[in-house]
Image: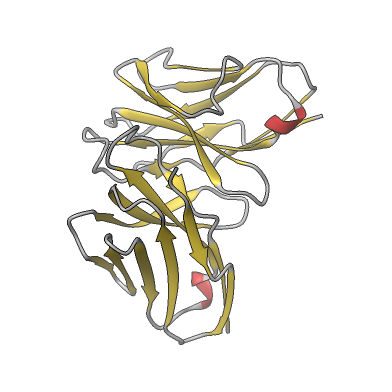
Amino acid sequence: KQEVTQIPAALSVPEGENLVLNCSFTDSAIYNLQWFRQDPGKGLTSLLLIQSSQREQTSGRLNASLDKSSGRSTLYIAASQPGDSATYLCAVRPRSGGYQKVTFGIGTKLQVIP
Amino acid sequence: EPEVTQTPSHQVTQMGQEVILRCVPISNHLYFYWYRQILGQKVEFLVSFYNNEISEKSEIFDDQFSVERPDGSNFTLKIRSTKLEDSAMYFCASSGDSGRQETQYFGPGTRLLVL
């Protein structure tokens, strides 16, 4: 059974700092990995989707990497801003055995202090 | 930009009652999903729906739950005989014509409270 772990559980940084959020998964047979942002009491906003054949994806100040063999992904946020404060979730889609059954991590709660 | 919408935003019900949660997916999407998130816990996959039938479901999605696409735009989740432990945020999501590769777009959620 796929398990997704996110470290740290919470992170507080001053504005302007670069930071890295980590996601690890136990079964490397994934189809893709997606990073989401969740604001309190709100839905999930997709940030980046990395296919299993890719090593990284970039969007603005965000860069996500994927090392499938080691079961790891990182989300790099450059020059953090107070508006980045949210919970960041990673989710993996399996390659087989129910490829719609996306498994989520519990998230990293980020606070960017002005 | 197209978005997934959900109604109601909040619902309070008595234990044993039936509830229907409604979603309007993005119009040209073909795959639809329901997830739930119990307070403080992970987002959990419930069910996926494609071509007017369930394509996959999790162990959570038992006979108490059902999904339907009653018309060309709505996608519903029905929970029969609600239990206290059904209290959670329920998210609908949709994705495009290649369900494996396409990004999933989530709605804002319905917060269900069972008393």
Percent coordinates x, y for residue B34 in the rendering: 48, 32
Q: Is residue B71 or residue A78 the one in the foreground?
A: A78
* Residue shown at 26% from the left, 39% from the top: B100
Residue ID at (79%, 21%): B15
**B83 or B24: nearer the viewer:** B83
Q: Quadrant of residue A99?
A: top left
Task: Name the foreground residue: A24 vs A64.
Answer: A24
Horizontal arrangement in the rendering, residue A92 relative to residue B9 (left or right): left
Number of labelled discs?
A: 0
Image quadrant in which you'd find residue A35: bottom left
- Left or right: where does residue A70 sit relative to residue B23? left
At horizontal 51% and vertical 85% (from top left) the residue drawn is A15
Describe residue A46's horizontal placement relative to residue B90 as left or right: left
Q: Position of residue A67 (x, y in %)?
A: 28, 65
Colour convention of the picture: secondary structure
Q: Is residue A13 above or below residue A83?
A: below
B58 is higher (above) or lower (below) than A39: above
Residue A62 lies in quadrant: bottom left
Quadrant of image for the C terminus of chain B: top right
Q: Position of residue B47 (x, y in %)?
A: 45, 28
